[in-house]
Image (spheres, helix red, strand yellow):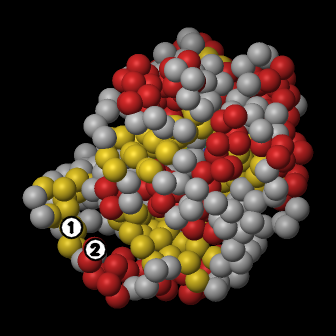
Amino acid sequence: MKVLVIGGGAREHALCRSLSLDPDVNALYCAPGNAGIAEVAELRPVDALDGAAVARLATELEADLVVVGPEAPLVAGVSDAVRAAGIPVFGPSAEAAQLEGSKAFAKDVMAAADVPTARSYVCTTPEEVDTALDAFGAPYVVKDDGLAAGKGVVVTEDRAAARAHALGCDRVVIEEYLDGPEVSLFAITDGVTVLPLQPAQDFKRALDGDEGPNTGGMGAYSPLPWADPKLVDEVMETVLQPTVDELRHRGTPFSGLLYAGLAITSRGVRVIEFNARFGDPETQVVLARLRTPLAGVLLHAANGTLDTEPPLRWSADAAVTVVIASHNYPETPRTGDPIEGLAEVAAEDGPDTYVLHAGTRREGEAVVSAGGRVLSVTATGSDLAQAREKAYKAVARIRLDGSQHRTDIAAKAAEGR
Ligand code: AMP
Ligand code: GLY
């Protein structure tokens, strides 16, 4: 099978790594990719937001499957363009990707499907904003309706800050604050059949102890030893299957990766958000544990034949990933700094510890930083404590001037807290 992956972050590196290990994959391309992905896939330049260009590239490469990684191309209709060219694509249509592209749309789908989520108001005027803020009280949760690359959500005790964020958006969702640990649960679906993956937890704040600004994610781990073993079944029944059914009934079936961001509250599981793609950095730990070869599952989802796929097989190992971010991330990340130590990790740390590249590029012989999140160091071990130790050992080998990482990824869970 010839597979083309669209995107160039750590999620796409994790996808390409898994696909490169799949014996059914005999040619693997990534567009545009990054310096790390180049080691497992052949890179092609492309404007990932240009559906016609992606479809042309897929046709030229005679791809049997196109996997669209990030949300922006999905919302821009890249999957639709590839599908129209007659090539199977893993990734929802632009209409179904509105589940991530518009928080108001997602709320409407959840209301129709009876999916548990925070109570909310959609506001377009200052009066509506004030009414909603007063209705819920502090802490205030204010979400830009559209795609904002992780920067659209403000959670604050400060009413003036909440109001200012709301008035800076054309349309906002203001909602009830949800208390409790967060879980990311992904499912692969063809629009009818839903195959859940294993849950993971992401660390969204920049600093240890969940302090500092929200980021795209600073680390993740899986499995979740503290979670109820029935969690996946419950979320399948109350969230994933009803959402997939609702979108199909609307005539806009969702096929691809449905990402449920959940809060485990004292009153039960609630959806915080949906995404229409694999999450980053959770994908790094979830795919590290997946034993079923990936390409066939994604192709079945693309072709609408997921009902023929047996349940996914998982490793009993635990996985931890730690993100290394650039100086000044997330505000104004500095780029262009050389990265050293990558060869040492590859030479010294064994096959269960590896570096996935997020924002990197090659400059002659050197690999330099090219984004806010630069690398994601992933390790598996017999339990979370061992996976953590291996991941942090590799993190310590990597040198990037001014870089930052959290030191407490999976720490509480590894200690049984
Ligand atoms: P989102 O972009 O929707 O994932 O939101 C970013 C982060 O804001 C989430 O991971 C949560 O930590 C927090 N958040 C979003 N919605 C809520 C909510 N209703 N209650 C509490 N925290 C929330
Ligand atoms: N890890 C959060 C996200 O991918 O949106």
Q: Horizontal placement of 406 versus 75: left or right? A: left
CA–CA distance between discs 1 and 2? 8 Å
Residue under the image location 62 percent in, 55 percent down: 294
Among the 4 quarters of the image, the one containing residue 271: top right
Q: Which residue is mark 1?
A: 339
The location of residue 375, given as percent across then percent down, is 35, 62
Query: Label 1: few (<14), some or many (≥20) within 10 Å?
Result: some
Where in the figure is residue 408, as x and y percent of width and height? 50, 74
Q: What number is the disc on residue 342?
A: 2
Does 95 sit above or below residue 416? Answer: above
| Number of numbered markers | 2
Q: Secondary structure at mark 2?
A: helix
Which residue is at the front of the view, 147 or 51? 51
On residue 269, the disc is: none
Vertically, is 122 above or below 7?
above
Q: Are marks 1 and 2 in contact (CB under 8 Å)?
A: yes
Left or right: 168 in relation to 239: left
Most foreground residue, 29 or 1: 1
**In the visual, does 403 lie left or right of 76?**
left
Residue at x-position 75% and y-position 66%: 313
Q: Nearer the viewer, mark 1 or mark 2?
A: 2
Q: Residue at x 64, y 42 (%)?
A: 299
What's under tag 2, amino acid-wise? Answer: Leu
As shown in the figure, which amino acid type bears the numbered disc 1? Ile
* Residue 358 appears in the figure: no
